Image (spheres, rainbow, N blue to C red):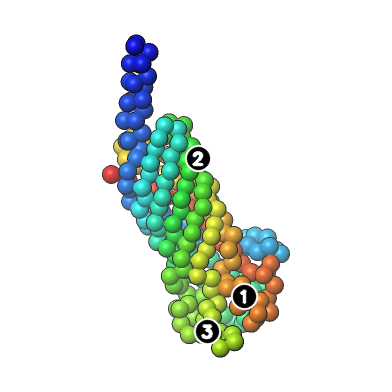
């Protein structure tokens, strides 16, 4: 009976402790984004800064946690010279892409500190590129076999790994890396229309620092 009582106390205490780090939160942060491709690797000169704002629901059960977020992610990068020089020798290299990003993260806690990893799926909303102030404009579509195809990949899939801190006060912090497995450009368009090799198409690499408050 005594052992059962002690076990119940431990379970209740653990549940109450976890609830302090479970719930909805709002956050904002900065990001730095570069690009890479399979052929050439990472382009050092591509790095540029952006921002994100969003919300999350965090569930903590003992040493494990699960977090789902919805973020407006404004990403900027500099398109490397080998790419934009093939398009035009005098265009600007700055590219802005705005995504609605949904990361799903598994978290491993030691106290309030945590290691988190998971996947992120993002939907491209808009932005600007080297030749257009609006990537949704007609000039960013090409006609293939009678169909207008967007030169951009509508969906980005990425892996996420990071470190975080969830405090009892409600403040939370995350430092994470997001590496895309999807190409920025529409693979079929760049291969069939422009004649690119898919290994030469750019993918995103983003580092983010996030600060939020959980209610």
Mark 3 near mark 1, Cβ–Cβ under 8 Å?
no
- The CA span between labels 3 and 1 is 12 Å
Q: Check the image and name the residue furthest to the front.
A: 1
- Is 201 on the left or on the right of 112, as rendered? right
Whether residue 133 is visible here, answered yes or no, is: no
User: How far across and how far down the image is residue 22, in percent?
Assistant: 34, 40
Classify 86 as above or below 7.
Answer: below
Nearest to the observer: residue 68 or residue 50:
68
- Mark 1 vs 2, N-terminal side: 2
Find out whether the residues at labels 3 and 2 contact each other: C-beta distance under 8 Å.
no
Any part of residue 9 in sight: yes
Q: Position of residue 1 (x, y in %)?
A: 34, 11
**Who comes first in sequence, dot 3 or dot 1?**
3
Residue toward you, 105 or 128: 105
Question: For the residue labelled by badge 1, is the local secondary structure a helix, a strand or a loop?
Answer: helix
Quick one: label 2, few (<14), some, or many (20+) residues within 10 Å?
many
Q: Which mark is residue 115?
A: 2
Quadrant in the rendering for residue 70? bottom left
Residue at numbered disc 3: 148
- Taking the spot 54% from the left edge, 70% from the top edge, the residue there is 153
Tag in front: 1 or 2:
1
Q: Residue at x 52, y 84 (%)?
A: 148
Say which residue appears at 68% left-offset and 62% top-offset: 38
For label 3, the crowd category at 10 Å Cα-Cα, with few meaning under 14, some 14 to 19 and many 20 or more, is: few
Tell me the SS state at disc 3: strand
In this rendering, position of residue 73 left or right of residue 199 = left
The answer for how far apart the CA atoms under marks 3 and 2 are is: 43 Å
Mark seen at residue 139:
none
Question: Residue 110: percent from the left, percent from the top?
Answer: 46, 32
Q: Secondary structure under badge 2?
A: strand
Residue where numbered disc 1 is placed: 188
């Amino acid at each position: 009976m005594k052992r059962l009582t002690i076990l119940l106390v431990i379970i209740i205490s653990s549940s109450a402790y976890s609830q302090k780090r479970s719930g909805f939160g709002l956050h904002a942060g900065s990001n730095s984004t570069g690009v890479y491709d399979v052929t050439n690797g990472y382009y050092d000169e591509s790095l540029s800064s952006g921002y994100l704002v969003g919300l999350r629901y965090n569930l903590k059960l003992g040493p494990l946690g699960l977090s789902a977020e919805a973020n407006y992610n404004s990403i900027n990068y500099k398109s490397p010279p080998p790419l934009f020089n093939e398009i035009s020798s005098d265009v600007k290299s700055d590219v802005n892409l705005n995504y609605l990003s949904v990361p799903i993260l598994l978290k491993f806690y030691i106290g309030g500190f945590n290691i988190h990893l998971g996947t992120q799926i993002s939907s491209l909303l808009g932005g600007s590129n080297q030749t257009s102030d609006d990537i949704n404009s007609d000039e960013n579509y090409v006609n293939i076999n009678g169909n207008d195809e967007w030169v951009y990949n509508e969906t980005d899939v990425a892996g996420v790994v990071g470190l975080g801190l969830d405090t009892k006060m409600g403040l939370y912090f995350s430092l994470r890396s997001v590496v895309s497995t999807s190409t920025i450009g529409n693979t079929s368009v760049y291969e069939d229309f422009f004649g690119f090799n898919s290994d030469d198409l750019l993918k995103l690499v983003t580092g983010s620092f996030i600060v939020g408050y959980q209610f």
